[in-house]
Image (tube, coloured by chain):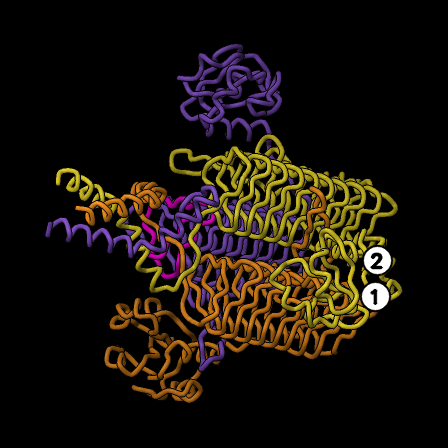
Chain colours: A purple, B yellow, C orange
Amino acid sequence: MLTLAEIAQHIGGDVVGDSEYTVSSVATLQSGQENQISFLSNTKYTKYLANTNAGVVIVSAKMVDSVPNNAIVVDDPYIAYAKAAALLNPIKENNIGVNPTAFIDDNCTIEPSVSIGAQSVIGAGVILEKDVIIGPGCILLDNVKIDEGSRLVANVTLCKDTQVGQRVLIHPGVVIGADGFGIANDHGKWIKVPQLGSVRIGDDVEIGANTTIDRGAIDDTLIGNGVKLDNQIQIGHNVTIGDNTVIAGCVGIAGSTSIGKNCAIGGGAGLGGHLDIADGVQITGMTMVTKSLTRSGVYSSGIPAEQTATWHRNVIRYRQLDKLTERVKQLEIQNKQG
Amino acid sequence: MLTLAEIAQHIGGDVVGDSEYTVSSVATLQSGQENQISFLSNTKYTKYLANTNAGVVIVSAKMVDSVPNNAIVVDDPYIAYAKAAALLNPIKENNIGVNPTAFIDDNCTIEPSVSIGAQSVIGAGVILEKDVIIGPGCILLDNVKIDEGSRLVANVTLCKDTQVGQRVLIHPGVVIGADGFGIANDHGKWIKVPQLGSVRIGDDVEIGANTTIDRGAIDDTLIGNGVKLDNQIQIGHNVTIGDNTVIAGCVGIAGSTSIGKNCAIGGGAGLGGHLDIADGVQITGMTMVTKSLTRSGVYSSGIPAEQTATWHRNVIRYRQLDKLTERVKQLEIQNKQG
Amino acid sequence: MLTLAEIAQHIGGDVVGDSEYTVSSVATLQSGQENQISFLSNTKYTKYLANTNAGVVIVSAKMVDSVPNNAIVVDDPYIAYAKAAALLNPIKENNIGVNPTAFIDDNCTIEPSVSIGAQSVIGAGVILEKDVIIGPGCILLDNVKIDEGSRLVANVTLCKDTQVGQRVLIHPGVVIGADGFGIANDHGKWIKVPQLGSVRIGDDVEIGANTTIDRGAIDDTLIGNGVKLDNQIQIGHNVTIGDNTVIAGCVGIAGSTSIGKNCAIGGGAGLGGHLDIADGVQITGMTMVTKSLTRSGVYSSGIPAEQTATWHRNVIRYRQLDKLTERVKQLEIQNKQG
């Protein structure tokens, strides 16, 4: 239980209402009840504000008059909510020590404050710094290094030589450091190009469930500080991702492409290989990127859904576009001659 | 070995031929031999009917004259085949007890009829109801609850608080309840929005290999009864999926989107966040959905493959569409003036 | 350390420079130093050749004059580099025996030269031939068979009856043999179609991280010899893939589609079900294939990224294509009448 005054101070906001009102948990506007705190950020949800039963709502100044109960007024309600939610839900001490079913190679360097979950495997030469938490069922192959305070939730696979920075959070099913897709065609038969680089992950990175990041072919694959990756992303060998770039689910990035800092890539987008994407580029969902994007800005492709009957007609017309252009040209010539 | 009479009774069909003919296994029309049962449902395979060596074929009434051997006539051959195949291939008793290499927290509630495979991990507070089968290498974090008769095949990860209904089948590599992609930009630096909801899976759900379903941010992510999910699907936080909806492989659904009942979503489709999809909507493969679909019906987007040379030309024309429209307008003005 | 003469002989090239010069490792043109060997294949990197510090560069004859240090001249520098890199980085003996934490059913056939990593599970009836390496955390369900010299890196799941050929390399997170997506709608309720086939993988196949290959419904799913699969690919039930076909990351292939030999499918492409793709077909990245491709050739679809403002305009014009075509027709009629 925290008072509104305590929360407002933590998130840097002003209480409108009862500063001594107590809050126990967070809720949406629709489900909120007494002693719960909610927020309004996305305008799609404004319609739920007037009738919310949440005891407190975090809002911007222009919405405060519509709040039926207590309010905390801030500049950015979503940021403020995130901070309030973290304050109300502190991460519990996860130091569970080393589970006896874990298999740990004799030749490792593991700080005493490290936790290792059941059925995990720690290979030779692995280095785990202070307060690292390895959840159950994780596999760290030889010479993996993880810096202070990072956490593998469960069932994460780090292939040999992978390096992970500080305060990194990796979700289940992630595979880092598998071989890149390096093959060369030798008279009709594909031979393997040895994948000799590794993967280096910066500090404060989060990696979503079942995302894969391949090791480099010669140099390393690099993920910058503060990068946030959603689920089911595929990152090819020798990709580099700049600091604070965020990538939504199901994105695929082919080998040797370099992405700048502070980029945002929407879900399901695909980026070809050997491209340069400038700092600050935004790419909307399902966009197909086949050329370098050398200037910051917002980029898109793809045609949104329509009813299938209409779609059929338009696809047919699309296939006649070249002919249609030709017909327009003919008309222009006729008009000139006429 | 079952007789045609036994099978016909089970699937609700009429034998045309020898009711005492015996069947040992299923086969396709192309590969079928004596004592095997096949079926014709997809008309693409009609060409194989006349020459099949399968001892029995399940067909609709209008095809029965083309069956060279015995037939069972039914309304829907695919449904009837599914039932016959299940009858001929009963699932073997999988109660293998609890493997000694499994790690089980002291603080669990596990029914005596539950099976737990080798190297699995069962966290604190987990509840496993009657006849639940946990295959090898599964990881159930704290407070997971699984209802009667559900089965995790192998290597499934259920994060804390995940709730699974009855008779649910979950394939390897599935991750349920990982954190949703909740981040907020605080003056250029991304901070994590705590993911405090959970995931609730209904009854009779099937979830394909390597599919991921994220936990809710505040409320829970909800998968309805009878939902069937194929492989490699990504379901974001706070998505809700209505009863009996089916989703093919590689679909991505962004956070807070609500999908109705009895929908069918084709492979590789992508749905944006915060959308409402009505009951009974069908979406064809690789469609990009950026707006709510408020009426049932079939929706599509995307342009099918053509030869690359043609594709190049059409892409160029597409990029000139705005200009082309302008040229047509000019011609219309000229014609009016002329 | 190898001399240039030794490397040149192995890769079938001619030394231009000092045959006794020694090489210890590989490097890119940009990062190369003394005693390192690099190569030039992709012309995007030609700009780095003149100033490279790499002690040796593998090049084609036409580039040799631009090499600042030693060179080895070959027909195909990428193939030659692959061979040189393998020569300089021999795979270390991985025979680690059987880890005591592995769970192995009593009823298996395992050659003495097989390695089995920590926390792995080997089910009943499994057959592992000579020199097979099962990395840590792998799960082999009943009756899996793996032929000589194949390797599962770590955390691979092979469902029951899966058959793997010789010298196959499978990366972490791969799931082979999970049930295909076979469902039939029985008056509004989906019933499961038993998935009774298996998966057979040929020789010299490589399968990337988190790729899934479903078991067949009746017959088996088949992956030919020399097939190379990248990460996060989904292959549906009863797909067949011909010898030496290569598939890049994030491709989805729906059930019963047959792909020929020597095909190349770009990243993120999607192929519908029940299609026939001829030998030698190439499909570029993110292409949507809805019909059979019966002749070899290169196929594409999808529209590349443009600035979002332009994209918006073109999408609107696209939706009016049918009307635009009608307007052109009207103009043509007017001109004829005029």
Residue C261: percent from the left, percent from the top?
A: 52, 74
Q: Residue at x 44, y 38 (%)?
A: B190
Q: Quadrant of the C terminus of chain B?
A: top left
Q: Residue furthest front?
A: C337
Magenta stretch in the rendered image: A265-291
Q: Residue A228: x percent and y percent?
A: 47, 45
Label located before the other in sequence (2 or 1): 2
Q: Is residue B144 visible?
A: no
Front residue of A41/B244: it is B244
The quadrant the N terminus of chain B occupies is bottom right
Q: Left or right of C12: which side holds A214?
A: right
Left or right of A338? Residue A269 is: right
Q: Amino acid at mark 1?
A: Val
Question: In this rendering, does residue A129 appear at all?
Answer: yes
| Residue B23, label in figure | 1
Q: Does A79 appear above or below A167?
A: above
Q: Are marks 2 and 1 in contact (CB under 8 Å)?
A: yes
